[in-house]
Amino acid sequence: MDNKRLLVCRLAVVLVIGGSMIGCQKSGSGTIKIGAIAPLTGQGAEYGKWAQRGVDLARQEAEKLSSGGQIQVVWEDSQLNPTTAVSALLKLADSDKVPLVLGPLTSGETIPCVPKAAEKGVVILSPTATSDNLTDVGDYFFRVCPTNRVQADAAAKFCRGSLKTTTAYVLNEEIAYGADLAGAFAERFEALGGKVVARDSFREGTTEYRPVIQKIRAANPDVIYLPSNYTEAGTFLRQLAQLRVKKTVVGGDGSYGKELIDIAGVAAEGTYWTTIAWGTGEDRVAAESFKQRYQASYGEPPHQFAGLYYDAARLAFQVVTRAHMTGKNVRDALLALPPFHGATGTTKFTQKGQVEKSFAVYVVKDGGFRQVEP
């Protein structure tokens, strides 16, 4: 799919949010636009596929309730490249005149986009950028996901509490996501009484892990903490098994997905991965509805990234209510929204555009992911 493809849908007159009916009236003339940035080609294309599917399900939902207005979701391809993501953001702001952009997908792409978006008066509504460095970055950044520190806390508690591990080797990919998680995990693991025996890193795209695996063998930790993307993590696991180093491995949501298992094969069995939890309690109905519709549409269970893009798109369709809206209008509308009970839990923005949500832990068993906590 090229980066100029448009997904066109009608604007919903009414969307059900948080159990209440909220009007979403189109006023004036012209087509309403929002932008979206994701890796549609290249190594991260699977992430982009999940993003587009989530947004498309939100579009379908809005279309069923439509009275005829149109909204365009203008997709741009970031290729998981920060420079390309900035170019995409500027194109959406200057050429397409959008007031709101969903994405980019990763923290590394999002961080340089935030000041550019603020300069242009465009809101970034991030589904998946989890860096703690994005906590207090101005009035035009919002996200529907919690921070890396929350994810690292869940991983550290699982390692110390459920797995009863006392020593950890922290090995991260050299990207903003990996570095953030590694630092936060190491801090939290030791605060809980564990010991980090070593910290190491590898470059994005690395294919040879045998030297660092030998270091791990010598350090003999109880657990390896591996915040990385699925391509690198899958290759690491395969080589770990080839060298017959049997260690418990725990990683983050960047590696969670069937692509990890496709690359690692049986070497993925018994590994653990944190990712955003599906909605529970009051949010369970929305979560189950989304998962059922995703399964029916695409023939497989949804990845949580699809759920996060779905929730972000639902909110975007709610606040972009007419053509030629300004980013300031959109920002104010997001802050004023009541709690939204979505697929990935309750979204209620703080004044800094942040949310509180929880992470779950999954284990790879019999070639699939099974939730073990909470």
Image (cartoon, grey):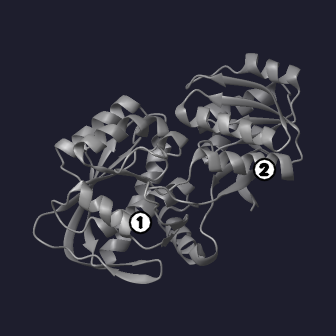
Task: Determine crowd level at label 2: few under 14, some 14-19, many 20+ residues with C-alpha closer than 10 A.
Answer: some
Identify the image quadrant of residue 81.
top left
| Residue 361 circle label | none
Task: Determine crowd level at label 1: few under 14, some 14-19, many 20+ residues with C-alpha closer than 10 A.
Answer: many
Relative depth, front residue between 369 and 310: 310
Say whether residue 26 is left or right of residue 311: left
Percent of width and height locating residue 198: 78, 24
Q: Quadrant of the N terminus?
A: top left
Q: Nearer the viewer's eye, disc 1 or disc 2?
A: 2
Q: Which residue is tagged 2?
A: 157
Tell me which numbered mark, 1 or 2, is placed earlier along the sequence: 1
Q: Residue at x 73, y 31 (%)?
A: 170
Q: Secondary structure at mark 2?
A: helix
| Residue 57 circle label | 1
Q: Amino acid at mark 1?
A: Leu
Percent of width and height locating residue 319: 31, 67
CA–CA distance in space, label 1 to label 2: 34 Å
Percent of width and height locating residue 65: 31, 79
Say whether residue 168 is left or right of residue 82: right
Identify the image quadrant of residue 302.
bottom right
Q: Secondary structure at mark 1?
A: helix
Q: Residue at x 11, y 64 (%)?
A: 30
Say whether residue 257 is left or right of residue 323: right
* Residue 256 shows in the view: no
Identify the image quadrant of residue 34.
bottom left
Query: Is residue 291 positioned above or below 227 on the image?
Result: below
Percent of width and height locating residue 345: 56, 67
Q: Amino acid at mark 2?
A: Lys
Q: Residue at x 25, y 70 (%)?
A: 10
Q: Residue at x 81, y 18 (%)?
A: 214
